[in-house]
Amino acid sequence: MNQQTLLEDSQEYLWLPFTQMTDYERDPLIIESGEGIKLKDIYGNEYLDGYSSLWLNVHGHRKKEIDEAIKKQLGSIAHSTLLGAANVPSIQLAKKLAQITPKNLKRTFYSDSGAESVEIAIKMAYQYWQNKGNVNKTKFVSLSNGYHGDTVGAISVGSVELFHRVYGSLMFETIKAPFPIVYRNQYDDLDQIRENALTELRGIFAKHHEEIAGITVESIIQGAGGMNIMPPGYLKGVEKLCQEFNILLIVDEVATGFGRTGKMFAVEHENVQPDLMTIAKGITGGYLPVAATMATEDIYEAFYGEYQELKTFFHGHSYTGNQLGCATALANLELYENDDILGRVQGNIAFVAEELQTLYELNHVGDVRQLGLMCGIELVRDKKTKEPFPWEDRVGYRTTLKMRELGMLTRPLGDIIVFMPPLASSKDELGEMIGIMKQAIKETTEKMPSVK
Ligand SMILES: Cc1ncc(COP(=O)(O)O)c(C=O)c1O
């Protein structure tokens, strides 16, 4: 099919997620292929994959071992249902996940996207208490600025004003606790910021614990809410409060899992043991849609019994436990061992940390936040006062368009530039990407009309 037809058809028939289609019409992009950490469009232009194809990709594109695992699985079967029947790779992957996740998590409940894995965790937590006869525990606590995906349950426990406000009356109510944001906090001291947030949470738990089923929390760093890193000890503090008040701790590792923050799972930074943990994105190395909700044996047992007891978890998606996806995840995890991904990524993290500091030389870089290879660069109109650019100016979006022109892809979160390269990127590639970011930020911000 020729390029012009593809372009016209994309505008005639597609509706892209999280995209104002007038933006797409003005600046269309159609990817045709990928190799290593580069993507190629239909005109042959190459782009460095600075967002890991939306926070997924681990080893680069067309990784031989994963390609082969998919072909091998196709030789047996692509899909059979997991409703009432297991399949071979789904069993092998569940066993592997029990080995690599925190030790209290043993059971894997599969789904197909991060949002679904959160939806499932919420329903599990809710039904857990119902099955145990604790019928008043029906509410959830969630953190300000949190993001857990786009289904109705997931947005209910989320709170990104821009994405969620229109759905106000559609969402179920949650009790919101403040996330300990560091940048623009009235306090500079991290201990103080942590303790303030934990004190507020303690107050909520103390007042409502008899009706609270669980709390949802992203692991150590909030992603789509702005790449906000918790002060050290905050997540551990949340875990302790959950234990004290008999509340389930639901940790969302969709973005942070599989080495993204330098540990296999971000909870390992503080040795936190969730009751439920959601995983997706990097689980297949960025190849296929597989997600899972990991549960403790205690939670599993609350659903276990004869059918007539009506404790069954009545939830499942058609493609749950898909063989191609599970075989891909297994091949991906084997590469973590064979290629020593977690060992090698430490050098990349240190290199990026050093290079990103140079962004502070720019007039409009207000804050650089990094946990592992999960980075956010906040652009501000005024560095001293931390005054943002007018939101309508879309300085973040404009900067990423400039980056595209210079040969690198990413998507902003408002005026925060996301840098999430594939874990296996080389130092040269990382350096090149940071160079492009720097140039794009400089050229874009200094030309903004609101900059005098
Ligand atoms: C922390 C977190 N949870 C859940 C999701 C939703 O995952 P998905 O897009 O696979 O539904 C995301 C996506 O970015 C995320 O960052």
Image: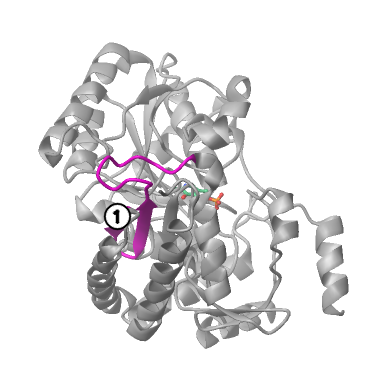
Q: In the rendered image of this protein, does residue 62 appear above or below residue 6?
A: below
Region in magenta? 366-390
- The relative height of residue 326 versus residue 452 in the rendered view (above or below) is below
Label 1 crowding class (10 Å Cα cut-off): few <14, some 14-19, many 20+? many
Q: Position of residue 298 (x, y in %)?
A: 35, 38
- What residue is at 29 percent from the left and 55 percent from the top? 369
On screen, residue 129 versus residue 84, left or right, reads: left
The number of numbered discs placed on residues in the rendered structure image is 1
Quadrant showing the N terminus:
bottom right
Residue at screen point 54% across, 87% down: 64
Q: Identify which residue, 83 or 423, lies in the foreground.
A: 423
Instruction: Give how far across and how far down residue 259 sits, in percent.
Output: 34, 65
Residue 394 at x, y percent in the picture: 53, 48
Residue 124: percent from left, percent from top: 48, 35
- Dividing the picture into quarters, in which one does residue 320 lie? bottom right
Disc 1 secondary structure class: strand
Q: Using the rendered view, name the quadrant where residue 198 is placed.
A: top left
Q: Is residue 103 magenta?
A: no
Residue, disc 1 = 369
Q: Is residue 375 magenta?
A: yes
- Hey, which quadrant is residue 258 in on the image? bottom left
In this rendering, position of residue 86 left or right of residue 424? right
Identity, as a three-letter code, of the amino acid under mark 1: Arg
Query: Can you see residue 306?
Result: no
The answer to whether any part of residue 3 appears in the image is yes
When the figure is inspected, residue 365 is found, relative to residue 373, above or below; the finding is: above
Instruction: Decide which of 314, 224 is in the foreground and name it.
Output: 224
Which one is in front, 366 or 131? 366
Residue at 20 percent of width and 43 percent of height: 231
